[in-house]
Amino acid sequence: MRRRTVVTMAATGAALGACSVPAPRRTDPAPDPAPGQPISTGRRALLMQILAHPDDDLYFMNPDTRLALDAGTPLVCVYLTAGEADGVNKIPGRPRPAPDKGAYSSARHQGLRQAYAALLGLRPFTPWEVSVAELGPDHRAEVNVLAADGRRVELIFLNTAMHTGRHRLGLPSLWQDRRLVLRTVVADGSPLRRAGSYTYDGLVGVLTGLMESYRPTVVHTLDPDPDIQHSTEAVRRRDSEQPGYSDHADHTAAACFAWAAMIRWVARATADGGRIPGFVTVAYRGYYNRHWPKNLPQGVLARKAAHLVPYGGSPDWDCGNPSGCGDYNVGGDRPLTNRKGWVRSTHHRYPGTRTVLTAEPDGRLAAYAVLGLRVVRWQETGPGSAAWGPPHDLGGGPLAPALGSATTRDGRLLLFGLRFAALGGHGADNEREIVVLEQSAPGRGFRPWRGLGSPSPGRDEVRRTGVPVAVAAPDGQIHLFVRDAEKGVSTRVRDGAGRWSAWRDMGGGEVQDGLHTAVDEGGRVHVFGAGHHAVHHWTQDTPSAGLTARTQLTAAPVPAHAPAALPAPDGSVSLYYRAAAGSGLTTARAGTAVPGARFDGYGPVDAAPSPRGPVLLGRTAEGLVQLLMGGGLHVRTDGPAALDGASLRLGPDGRPSVAGLGPDAAPWMWRPR
């Protein structure tokens, strides 16, 4: 028997202007919003995922979701659409069934219950608590809860229809048209008895209310700004992508609604001097996975794909749900045999350094990260203490989670971020820009935030701006690099007097976001990116000259991510990365792979030079942070689980410090001996 209960969420009524973001200010360098707000800290970890469809989390966010659950982090998944599509739950090898949208939605809900029960180590048909949540005065949703051994998963089904009455996609239409009223679908067997509806503002308000009620410390979203993808109409339809872009339109709209809600949450919380909500974000690519080399090795992939098997289920299972026991076209080995290969990668939309680690003049370390969509600084309580003091707000939001950094010759830190300069639907501005925060003096405060614009200033192209990466050259110049809308690399250069050049396209082929830089022994700046078939390389002919594209490094294996780069004594640059679908470490020099150390795992690799050879930072196949130095392998097994983007710094004594953020949105530090 399903039990019906009522859960009351925070009020969802909010002024539409609360989610609007001012356009970037080109003449006034004052930070927006201003720094110095108090920050909410010390909260219990909770992960909230905002999804378009049932299975988006299993395809695009795992293994990160599984790692959070394994660490005991409670999980709340919010599914915006009913996932009912055309109502046909296709059974491979059997006659096409009659369409039934309520039944198909119910079957997909059952598939999620089966998948998450398995993720918790329980039987797939473990009973869940099923209830109704009152989301303010006008909206209700089905809520499923499963708790076991101190772990908890909560599924919230908003169940908006995937299509409008005119057969347009529902969620993208709702994002674009604030006059639209989008109905909901009642899944068979749900405790809800009648359909509801959502407007643009109603959906942003409900998501904001859920965030205010649950107060997540980590928010997972899909990709709000997918790559431009030039495909024929036949290929686009076959790949289920929106016209001109490498993702499903529902994914993009769901991500935009999620970011609009996060921006509104911060705006409401900080009104009248309130505290910044202490949360971090992770955004994931979707159908992008189809177009680039796969980045999960066999062992990690097998475990990820296995969790889609109970979601797909089977019509022969006795799951207790008369409407269906999963999304049948997804079960068995079909995630692995599907030519689109979505399951074979997990790509972060904003890859790179999440935590910038620097040394203060008094010997303490400082860490900088995006918290509550703003930059925050923590300082060690004392030199070598490995304990962090309270966070200090530096403003600058709303920002994507990855940061770039560089240090001037006189020791002043520059931080670079990707800012959501404007975000809105129905023809409103939707812009991104690169911003910079510069220290006034070493170890001192910061000047106001300054906007640096984007190399792709077109109305739509500006949204495809990548995360900033910067490096200081020996001649005093600061080189800033971003991936642009055409998937190439563009740059701005700051001279020794602090003047910035205009944006310049450096040419070359297409690369993924997440670039790496190095300065060789001769003082030349290098940039490396991961292309479709090879590592791409840009460098200078001589120090102080402009960077240009060079021959692709085709003699080494195809990269899964941009290689970490370190200068070699012979004047060349050594590269460290994992090959596509591989777990081992690839080491390359002068464009050719050379024998390297054993450093199996998955995901990007970072590197730092030391007298005893390179120190490498990465993840094990189980997702733990690992460090290779002096021929010894060290694995971090204590402390909170690590989010992506940890950073590595070597002290004057050569001892490494690794810093990152945990699922509680608090920083940790690891100093292996």
Image: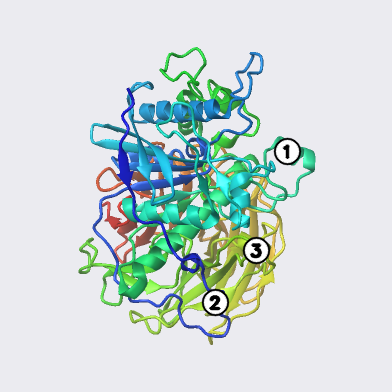
Label 3 sits on residue: 427
Tell me where residue 649 appears, x and y as whole percent: 36, 61
Q: How far apart are the two marked residues, 2 and 3, measured between alpha carbons? A: 23 Å
Q: Amino acid at mark 2?
A: Gly
**SS at mark 1 in the image:** helix
Residue 128 higher or lower than 332, as above or below: below
Q: Residue at x 62, y 77 (%)?
A: 544
Residues at discs 1 and 2 in contact (Cβ within 8 Å): no
Q: Which numbered disc flags the more N-terminal residue, 2 or 3?
A: 3
Tally of numbered tags = 3
Q: Residue at x 52, y 30 (%)?
A: 105
Q: Amino acid at mark 3?
A: Gly
Quadrant occupied by the N terminus: top left
Tell me where residue 170 appears, x and y as whole percent: 61, 45
Tell me where residue 456 appears, x and y as whole percent: 67, 67
Label 1 sits on residue: 237
Q: As drawn, which residue projects farthest toward the bottom?
A: 497
Q: Is residue 29 left or right of residue 384?
A: right
Q: Which numbered disc flags the more N-terminal residue, 1 or 2?
A: 1
Nearer to us of marks 1 and 2 is 1
**SS at mark 3 in the image:** loop
Instruction: Give the label on residue 629, or none.
Output: none
Q: Quadrant of residue 581?
A: top right
Q: Which numbered disc flags the more N-terminal residue, 3 or 1?
A: 1
Label 2 sits on residue: 451
Residue 215 in view in this figure: no
Residues at discs 3 and 1 in contact (Cβ within 8 Å): no
Residue 73 higher or lower than 305, as above or below: below
Q: Amino acid at mark 1?
A: Arg
